[in-house]
Amino acid sequence: MSSEGSGMNGEARYRLTTRHKRFMDTIVTIHIADAESSANDPRMEQAFEAFAHVERVCSRFRPDSELRRLCDRAGQPVVVSGLLFEAVRFAILLARETDGAFDPTIGRLMQEVGFDREYISGERTAPAIAEDEADSVSIANWKDVIVRETDRTITLKRPLVLDLGAVAKGLAVDLAALSLRGLPGFAIDAGGDVFVSGLNADGEPWRVGIRHPLQPDGNIAVLRLTDAAVCTSGGYERISRTQSETHHLLDPRTGRTANTLISSTVVAPYAMTADAYATAAFILGHSEGIALLEETGLDGMLIAPDMTIYTTSNFKRDVL
Amino acid sequence: MQPASPTKTPTQAQSAAPKSEGGVSATAAYKDGTYSGSGTNRFGTVEVAVTIKNNKIASVEITRCATRYPQRVIDKLPSQVLEKQSGEVDVVSGATRSTEDFQNAVRAALAKAKA
């Protein structure tokens, strides 16, 4: 869909062009604020293509993805594309930093609790795992993934299912942002992974609402931002098909849903960083989560089930 | 959810090419063409155009997205971040507002595409 409009008050500095497409099991929306209509700007198409590309490489749900082909070749070093290498390298770094609270080898566990198909189409596309491999797969963790920069290889020491869900979408947003560089203002929203750049149609920094965890149509805070990514992870989003009390944010250390928080928001220079750290903080809980963000130099807000709100010391800086 | 209707007559129906990936029974055979579907929930209505090529979803484009962004007054929230509540936002982080209706819209379109 394509829509256009001008900013508020009839005194818009720029025209706002908005398009939506579906990639990576979510809805991707791109807004461009420019003096001219951007409906036919090739950069819009290129930005959407970034999502298609990352999906072809990193999807756990596509049998022909490079990620799935890597998972089919456990036990040997596999030379991978630069994109897949970066995504896995970053995920493993964060796994090490969080001592496994964040763990990209969680794919198998996700399948076991019912996340075995695309959320939107409902098509079951997860790989089957042979019975004799099942035990090995369920004890696999991030330490079984060897990432070697010198020859850009990844070795899976045992059969396992990588899930780059908390990394790939952010990476795609960052690549899409590269395609849109040079425009006076744009905002990318990939199912809640947001990146904003330049100014909105009113010539002001973008207003990014943080979804209220208990009121789906309300915001709990509004940030004024530019040239920054915001990602919010919430246990309210994706519920398992088979276990209604299970949402998509599993604690790899226990195999169960992480339940000490209901929402985790991170502001970061890149969407990949924001998404992965929001997921990690969600699993770690408020105390360790805030500590992780402060150590890393990121801003964030964590919300407990009783609506207690925890923020990093600089978070309020961005709040409207 | 509203019933879906094809926007475009499907192109030449493919003679069934039931492709099964790893014995997954849910793999359906679809006819080439572009199909529309719509879905509604309390946040709005979404209409999609699903294009099928070679029994696969080649693209899904949202053709209409009438999603409301009502801003409720949030009272009694114990928080330092609610110093000011803006009524207007450009984009929402953590929003999955139209995911359910989108999913319904895609399913409606796919039902039309079934061979």
Image: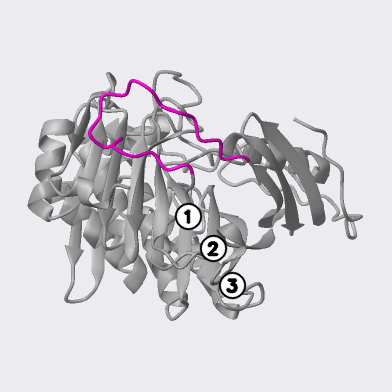
Residue under circle 3?
Answer: A45
Q: Secondary structure at mark 2?
A: strand
Q: Are marks 1 and 2 on the same chain?
A: yes
Q: Which residues are magenta?
A: B68-87
* Residue appearing at x 29%, y 21% in the figure: A305
Residue under circle 1?
Answer: A189
Dot 1 surroundings within 10 Å: few (below 14), some, or many (20 or more)?
many
- Left or right of B99? Residue A4 is right
Q: Are marks 1 and 3 on the same chain?
A: yes
Task: Judge depth for marks 1 and 2 and give the one in front.
Answer: 2
Q: CA distance from mark 1 to mark 3?
A: 15 Å
* Residue appearing at x 86%, y 53% in the figure: B15
The quarter of the picture where residue A99 lies is top left
Q: Secondary structure at mark 1?
A: strand
Q: CA distance from mark 1 to mark 2?
A: 8 Å
Q: Is residue A207 magenta?
A: no
Q: Chain of mark 2?
A: A
Residue under circle 2?
Answer: A31
Residue contact between numbered discs 1 and 2, judged by CB atoms under 8 Å: yes
Mark 1 and mark 2 lie on one chain; the one further toward the N terminus is: 2
- Left or right of A35? Residue A54 is left
Q: CA distance from mark 2 to mark 3?
A: 12 Å
Return the x and y of residue A134 as percentages of the image width and height. Answer: 33, 33
